[in-house]
Image: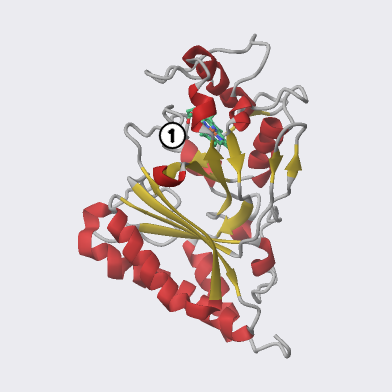
Amino acid sequence: MSEKNWDRVPIDAQSIDAPLSRAAVFLVVTVASEQTALAKVCSVLDGLDDLIKTVGFRDLPARLSCIVGIGRAFWDRLHFDQRPQELRPFARIEGAAHVAPSTPGDLLFHIRSERPDLCFEFERILLDNLSDGVTVVDEVSGFRYFDARDLLGFVDGTANPTGLALPASALVGDEDPNFAGGSYVVVQKYLHDLSAWGRIPTPLQEEIIGRTKIDNIEIDDDDAPRKSHKSLTTIVDAEGNEYDILRDNMPFGRPGQREFGTYFIGYCRYLWVIEKMLQRMYVGDPPGHYDRLLDVSTPHTGTTFFAPARPTLQTLVQAARQAPATPGR
Ligand code: HEM
């Protein structure tokens, strides 16, 4: 990506490549059906950059950033005559043993910072501004756990694309020119059964994930009878091209409630890539040989969004603000 000046000025809204952080908030809301709610939400989205400046400038090295994703149903309420080619609702998946539910969400706010208090402050003011225009349907505060481990104890995020491979995998390109620079975003909130995971011997845990636990070395499991999570989520086409996604998963939890989770968030250039990963995890390859990570990890949400590039977002919300009210809405 181009040179970034992240220590000098706040981070622009919609910077998919903003740095992975120590803290994050994942906020999913639905928007009330009235036209006034739509107008209020669009005005807040129009001012997202200013809100990042308001909070982020108070501690620039804390690198506050925010990305908003728009769900398919809400997109259709905006007065915009085009839609990203692949934007569709998250499709529920029923595997032989595990189900990935599809849950509602009009907007996703992915708020990141080195400091949880900045995430908190940004979310507080954001929700104040959105007020009764929205209903919060899910809110998760994630934290970095040691050397970027998930609560299962494995380092999570290693195979993320870097350098030029990052925009090539995460950002829409010339194939959909009206939405170039944007990204499809899929989220799932997983809760883990840590006691059951703890009963699995470490060598088998490593087979399930596809990496060693302590030193994070990739395991070559091409000939293994059962594919690992790493292999099931590796997508290669007939010509041998591999399709990556950008993940920024975060652990979350409340030990007092025995709640231990991973918030999965994936950004991709082609939505079909994440959909295919999910099919392979839940249905299995070959079918039946699903991802054993799911035996100890249950998804409670599943929602798809599109995060437009910053100029597209501005055009979108400004068009919606200027559109005449539709009678009855
Ligand atoms: C309970 C939820 C999940 C946990 C704890 C988890 C954890 C991990 C871990 C530890 C790795 C290996 C290190 C790495 O490269 O990051 C990994 C790799 C990966 N995961 Fe997940 N994951 C979860 C869900 C998902 C989902 C739902 C998807 C996609 C739909 C996904 C896609 C990937 C991909 C693409 C890789 C890299 C594979 C490669 O090596 O090329 N993960 N995950």
SS for callout 1: loop
Residue 227 visible, this orientation: yes
- For residue 107, what is the image quadrant? bottom right
Q: Residue at x 65, y 68 (%)?
A: 74
Q: Quadrant of the N terminus?
A: top left
Q: Residue at x 64, y 19 (%)?
A: 227
Q: Is residue 176 above or below residue 134?
A: above
Q: How is the image coloured?
A: secondary structure
Q: Is mark 1 within 8 Å of ligand 1?
A: yes
Q: Is residue 1 above or below residue 161?
A: below
Q: Is residue 92 left or right of residue 252?
A: right
Q: Quadrant of the C terminus?
A: bottom right
Q: Residue at x 55, y 12 (%)?
A: 220
Q: Position of residue 277 (x, y in %)?
A: 65, 35
Q: Position of residue 148 (x, y in %)?
A: 37, 34
Q: Position of residue 140 (x, y in %)?
A: 46, 54
Name the amino acid type tagged 1.
Asp
225 or 261: nearer the eye? 261
Q: Which residue is mark 1?
A: 150
259 or 152: nearer the eye? 259
Residue 6 visible, this orientation: no
237 or 229: nearer the eye? 229
Q: Is residue 174 left or right of residue 214?
A: right
- For residue 82, what is the image quadrant? bottom right
Q: Position of residue 183 (x, y in %)?
A: 56, 52
Q: Is residue 266 left or right of residue 329?
A: left
- For residue 76, what is the image quadrant? bottom right
Label tally: 1
